[in-house]
Amino acid sequence: MNKNLKEQVLRSSGVNVLKCMRCGKCSGTCPSYDEMEYHPHQFVYMVEKGDIETLMKSPSIYKCLTCFACVERCPRNVEPAKVVEAVRLAAVRQQDGNHLSPDMIPEMLDDDLPQQAIVTALRKYAK
Amino acid sequence: MQRIGVFVCHCGTNIAATVDVKTVAETLGKEPGVVISQDYQYMCSESGQNLVKDAIKEHNLTGIVICSCSPRMHENTFRKAAAAAGLNPYLVEIANIREQCSWIHKEIATATEKAVILGRAAIAKVHLNAPLTAGESPVVKKALVIGGGIAGIQTALDIAEAGFDVDIVEKNPTIGGKMAQIDKTFPTLDCAACILTPKMVEASQNERITIRSFSEVTDVKGFVGNFTVKIKKKARYVDETKCTGCGLCTEKCPMKKVPNEFNMGLDNRSAVYIPFAQAVPKVATIDPNYCMMLKTGKCGVCSKVCSVGAINYKQQDEIIEEKYGAIIVATGFNPISLDKYDEFAYGQSPDVVTSLELERLMNAAGPNGGTLLRPSDKTHPHTIVFVQCVGSRCDDSKGKPYCSKICCMYTAKHAMLIREKYPDTEVYVFYIDVRTPGKNFDEFYRRAVEQYNVHYIKGMVGKVTPKSDGKIDVQASDLLANEQLHINADMVVLAAAIEPDKTARPLATMLTTQMDTNDFFTEAHPKLRPVESATAGIFLSGACQGPKDIPETVAQASAAAAKAIGLLCKNSITCNPCVAHSNELMCNGCSSCEKVCPYGAITYIDKEFRMPDRTTKVRRVASVNPAVCQGCGACTVACPSGAMDLNGFSNSQIMAEVDAICK
């Protein structure tokens, strides 16, 4: 368990996962349920356990539509979508991760793309 | 010269672990007027009390200070001990060094310092204490029960059984409450009406019980043993003494499109109506919102067909004033409104119903004569989904924070009854937890699963969607299988949370009783005084105090009756001598105190005073009735000239305490 990662997810989501009473209404209401490997209620529970790396590696973090149905309907106001978003952010901003290398740039080039965006992206996502 | 004794209690480790009791006793022993200062492990014990008694006799004490727990806990204990040793009990002061000191502090040094200060303040106060003698006030030997559901009926029957008169005030045209609407009761599955209606009849036939139906309490004055209550008897436009309950008027009434409250609006009734066949009193009531005669002056059919001439369109609301010794609150509960929960489509499909509506749909006196049919097309449902915890166990912003307690059991009951009567129906129950603490309760739920094959699924329904073919799509999660389900249902039943009746809040204000944030009445002690309110003479019965099933409600109703009987048996009760009095020379007759007094204890009199020049002058001054005054102190705060003062809590005593604290 990565304590720092858990702390980061809790802080960036602003969610108190301990409020969850494990009713599963978030997963009962989720329109992307069948697309997801881990479902909204599992996100909440796994973040509580600190098992965040597993979630970060799962494609599930990109399957959430951020429709906020789970946030709207959670009886305990836990806001699962914000937890998913926080895990997604943790994955995207993961330090030392090499998401972009300079040789990937040429094929991405576009006349409308400002050069500054490329430099920023490289700074943010390249090792 | 005062001779004061100080006694510091360890309360085991409750106080001694955080407060250095030896230092406290030693320091307080040096205060002026203190002749003896001791500490002891348990001052409230027999030997602790003997210590106090012996010291009073030996040192001829004129006042004592006990540094211990809250006065709510043991003030009476030590007052009795003092009285036994020949000291006036009102010369005892308690310094609360447990709840207000040791329990809330962690550091010994600061806690000890605070304990000394609290003790010093109490010593300063006891210096000014005067011996007081408690008077007595008579007890009116009659009880008022507010609410005529099963709780109120049981309480009234028990009080009447003990030989006291009881009035039941019920806001609806009949007594019976929620239990009258229920079809079967768990865990025995006996018919609710079969066990309730005999009790309703018993209440109506008992000569000691007066049922004031279609009435509401509008004002409560007075105090324990002597309440004066105003009851509004709402106009029912039918003379109760003449009406025989034959029902001819209800048959002939041309206005038949009124939603029937008794059947939860699932069918209609006439404008003149008797709520149900076994209603008590069985008397017709005219609904002024729908009656053509009352609205437009054109009709009068009921009056023409009534053979006894009971109809009276000119009847007015009537205010009745009665005196009671005890009041029992039994205002009950209601299911919450489901408007907030769009995801369950309650307002979108008539086939999504609440559990109470299902009770009516399954009841023989219900809209379908006991056959379970879908409200929309009157066909048999073949797949029924039950949703638990709708609005219960929620975050405050989403619903009620508490568990409604009864839903798990009644849902198991409904599921079982449906499977028993219609074995071709599939029944699904979505639960978060199944909570069945109670005698034979878990066995009952297991029977629903094992014997009746009800599908219990751990998970919550996320979305209910009525479809164009009349079916209802229920989207839910099955947590144990880790999958999302879609059930093609014919009916959905929502276990709506329950909440206290809306009349409870204004009633609590009238009775000066406490409520919690959910509007449930607060009991005097959550464990040891569960049926009394903190206001003397007011008792709590049934679901007005918290969610309860029928067995628990009846048990609490009888307990409340026992407490009320204990009060009514007494010919008189000892009054609190710590009451207000007015210094007539300072009173300027402004009436401020009279206006703030919640008990109506203050009146104004014209009194003759001799002036310095030997003339006399008549002045208007306040006069307190000590039998009515409860010593709340509101008048002493309101009085602009400082003429009002409270025995045992005088302004000078409070100032002395403040001075001692600030020293």
Image (cartoon, coloured by chain):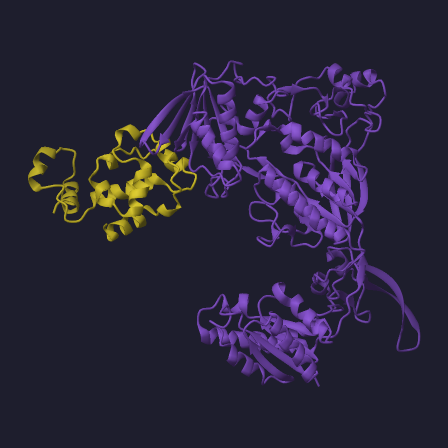
Chain colours: A yellow, B purple
Which is nearer the eye, B1 or B366? B366
User: Which quarter shows the N terminus of chain B?
Assistant: bottom right
Which is nearer the eye, B632 or B642? B632
User: Which quarter shows the C terminus of chain B?
Assistant: bottom right
Quadrant of res B116: bottom right
User: Which residue is at the far right?
Assistant: B615
Q: Is residue B94 left or right of residue B11?
A: right
> Residue B193 at x, y = what percent?
65, 28
Q: Is residue B348 left or right of residue B1?
A: left
> Residue B584 at x, y = what percent?
82, 69
Q: Is residue B565 left or right of residue B522?
A: right
In this rendering, the count of numbered labels is: 0
**Residue at (64%, 75%) from the top-left corner?**
B50
Above or below for B275 versus B614: above
Above or below for B375 versus B58: above
Above or below for B571 versus B356: below
Quadrant of res B302: top right
- Is residue B349 visible in the rendered image? The answer is no
